[in-house]
Image (cartoon, rainbow, N blue to C red):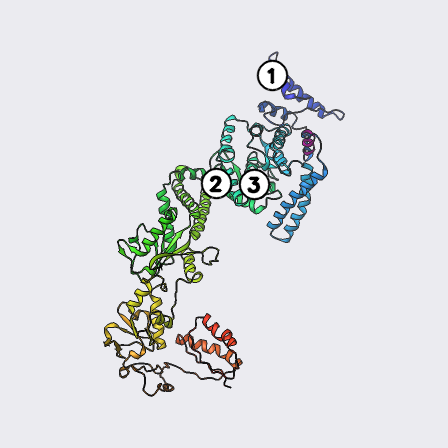
Amino acid sequence: MDEVLSYVEKALTMGVGESNLGRQTLNFLQTLTTEIAGSSHAAVVYSLQASSREAFDNVGLLNILDHLAARLDAKREPVVGDEILEVLRKRLLAEMPADSDARQAAKAISRVVSQWQTAEALDAASRRLAQDDEIKFARRLESAYPFHIDLIEIMKTRWASLPNFQRTRGALRFLATVLYKCKKLNRHSPVVGPGDIPLDDADVRNAFFSEVIAEAVQRDQYHSVLEHDFIGGNSRVKRIDTRLTKENPALSNFQPGMRLATAIMMYSFGGVQREQGRETLPPGVSEKELIEASLVPGLDSITAQSVLKRLREELLFLHYDGIRYCFKTQANVNKLLEDEVESVRPEEVRKHIEVTIGERVGAVTNAAVIWPDKSEAIPDKEPRFLLVYLPLEFSEKSRADQEKVALNYLTNIGSEPRRYRNGIGLSIPDPKEMEGIRRAARYLLAVDRVRKKQSSYKLGKDQMDQLKERESTEKAALEAGLRILYSSVWLLRVDGGKPALEKLEVGGRPVKAQSIHERLQELLIDVHGKLFTTLRPAKLMSLMLVGKGAGEHCQVETKVILDTFFGTPGFLRLKDADVLRDAIAQGISEGVIVYALKNRVREDKGQYSVSGQDAVIGRRPGLDEIDLDSGIIMLPDCVLKDELIGVPPGVPIPSSSPPPNGPEPEPPMPQPPRPGQSVKSLTLKMKLSKTMLFKTFNVLGLLADKAGEIKLEVHGENLDADPTWLRNAITEPLSEAGIDYKIEEEQETT
C-alpha cells in the first residue's frame, strides 16, 4: 500500500454511518497488521512520509499511522548510508565522471586535510591515526565526487532532523540547483563542498530556504542575515576577502572569508544526534569540523584559522559559544558594538589614544611631552633630553607646514627663543598606522559602553565572554599600532647658519625594544648615535677646550658646560644632566679634573686658583655633590700647592707652574697600613707570562669592583712587532672599546 496517509486523509471526509471512511480504514489497518503478524506466509508493506512537509503538515495523522504498527513493524529506508551517493550521481549527472578525475580530486583534498591533522596531532599515535584516516577519507571523497562528502553528511545527519526536509527528494532538488549554478557561474573547485554553495545567486538562496526553512518570517530574517554579512554591497564577508586579497593576491581564487562563512551557514540548521542516547546537539559546527570541510589545495589551515578569527570578530550574526559556530537571526555582540561605534565622537577617540600613549610612555620615563598643542607646552631649560610626541593630526599636514611647525617647536617657546634647543627631539607619527589605531580605539570605547549597558541589553555569560575576547583583540591591535606609530625623530641642526631639521628614521634597521619610548631611545642611542648616556672626562675636557694647549682654558664653569651641551644645536646630545655629573665625578677621581664652587675660586689677571680645602680631587664624589649651576671645573694646576689638605695618598700633587728642573719625581709608594687601618689605595707590580696573565683577570675584576675603576700600566718587551700588527692587535681594539689610553713606542735602532 502506497500513499496511505494521503488516502486516509481523503477518506476522513467521507461519512460511513455515524463514522467515516478514514476511521474505518484505520481500524482495518490495525486489524490487518495484527493478523499478518500471526502469519508465517504473509507480509504487508506500506509507505509513510519521512517529514511533516511531505505529510502536508498533518503530523498527528502521520504519528497515528506510524503507531499502528509500531509494535510489529520492521522499518526500512529505501536509501541508507552511502547508498545515497550513487543515487545522487545517477540522478544529477548526465554521465558518470571518470574514475581518474574523482581519484585525483579526492587525493588532493585528503592530503591537505591529513597534513593539517598531522600538524595538530599531539603525539605519535595521533599522527599515525591521521595518516590512516587519510586513506579512508580519500575513498569516501572519491565515492561522493563531484560533491564533498561533508556536504552530503550535513544533509543526512543534520538537515534530516528538520521536519520539513525531504532527505532524498529535497537533497536532489537542492544539489541540482547548486550544481547547475556552479557550472553556469564558472566556479572552480575540486568538488562542491559546504563552502562552495553560491549563496550570492538568488535561485540557490531560494532553493536553500525552501528546503530547510518552513516559516516565511524566518526566511525573511535569514535574508537579512545574508544581506548584512554575505551578499550586500558592503557586506562584512566581502570586506574581509577584499583585505585578504590585498595582503595576498593568491587568495583571490579562494575567497576564504565567503568559503568559511558559507560552510558555517550550511551547518547552522538541524542538530546532530549524539552517538549514545537520543539527545540532539544544537545547530552549529566546531572549528575542527569546519576546517576539515573547507580545506582545499591552495588554502592552508593557518590561513583558514586566521580568517575564522576575523569572521568571529566582524560578522554581525555569527555566534560562537566557545565550541560551535552558528548563524542566528539575532545579532551578536558585534552588532551592539557597531551600534555603539556610531555614537563614539572623534574627540573621544583622540583623547583615548592620547591618554594611552601617555600611560605607555610615562611608565618608563618622565622625559617626554605628549601631544603639545603649542610650543609653550614644551618645557625649556630642563637639563634632560625631551622627546616630544606630536599628535596624529601632524601627519595630515603638508610637508611644508610640518617643517614650519617642527622648527617653531624646536627653536621657540611662545614668542621667546628656546634656550635648550639641543635637548629636544620631535617624534613624528606615521600616517600609515593612524587609521588602524583610531579604529581600535573607537571599538574599545564601544566595548566599554556595551559593558556598562549589560543589564539593559540582557547580555548573558557567552556574550560577555565574546565581548571580553573582542576587547582583547582590539587592545592587541591598538598596542601593535602604537608600538610602530612613532618611527622617526626630528632634531635641530644648523645649516649655513640657519636652523634646519635632521630627520632620523627607523626604516629597515632592526630595533629590539618593543615599547614606544624605548624604541625611539634605541633609535637615537644605538642606531644613529645621536644621544649619549655616558661621557668620558677626556671627551668632556676636549669639547669644552679645557687644557694647556693653544686656545684652551684652565677652567670652565659648570653652568657654561650645561648650557653648551643642551643649548647648542648639533652639539653632543646627552640623556640628562647626570651624564655630565658622572663625567666630572670620574675626572675628579682620576685626578684630571678639580671641582669647586665658583665663589671659592680666586682669579688674578686671568690666573685661577683654589685652596685645597675648597677643591674636590682624588676621590669620586657623589653626583649630588656636583652643582651644575654654581660649580666650576679646573685643571689640577689651579690648586694651591701649599694648601692641599686632605688629599689622599697616591694622588699627584699639582703645581701652578712647571718645575724648573724638569718633571717632578714620582710620588713615593704608600706604606702598608698599620694594623686596624683601612686600605685607601693599592698598587700592584707584577711581571706576567701569558698563562699567568689569565690567572689575574679574576683578581683585577674584584679590585675594579671594589675601587670603582683601576689604572693599569702595561709594559711589553722584546715585541719585534711591525706597525700594522700594533694597530690591528692593540690600538684599534682599545679605541673600539672606548678605552682612553696612552701608548709609548720604542723604535728599533740600526
Q: Position of residue 692 (x, y in %)?
A: 51, 81
- Marks 2 and 3: in contact by CB < 8 Å? no
Instruction: Please tell me whether residue 67 is drawn above or below residue 345 in the rendered image.
Output: above
Q: Amino acid at mark 1?
A: Leu
Which residue shows up at 60% across the image and 40% down it?
Answer: 293
Question: Residue 252 has which mark?
Answer: 3
Tell whether position 655 is magenta: no
384 lies above or below 157: below
The residue under label 2 is: 314
Residue 371 shows up from this direction? no
Element assignment for label 1: loop
Label ID, residue 12: 1
Q: Main secondary structure of the magenta part?
A: helix
Image location of residue 317, percent across then percent down: 49, 36
Between discs 3 and 2, the one toward the N terminus: 3
Residue 85 makes an appearance in the image: yes
- The first of marks 3 and 1 along the sequence is 1
Mark 3–mark 1 distance (CA, rounded to whole Å): 60 Å
Magenta stretch in the rendered image: 85-91
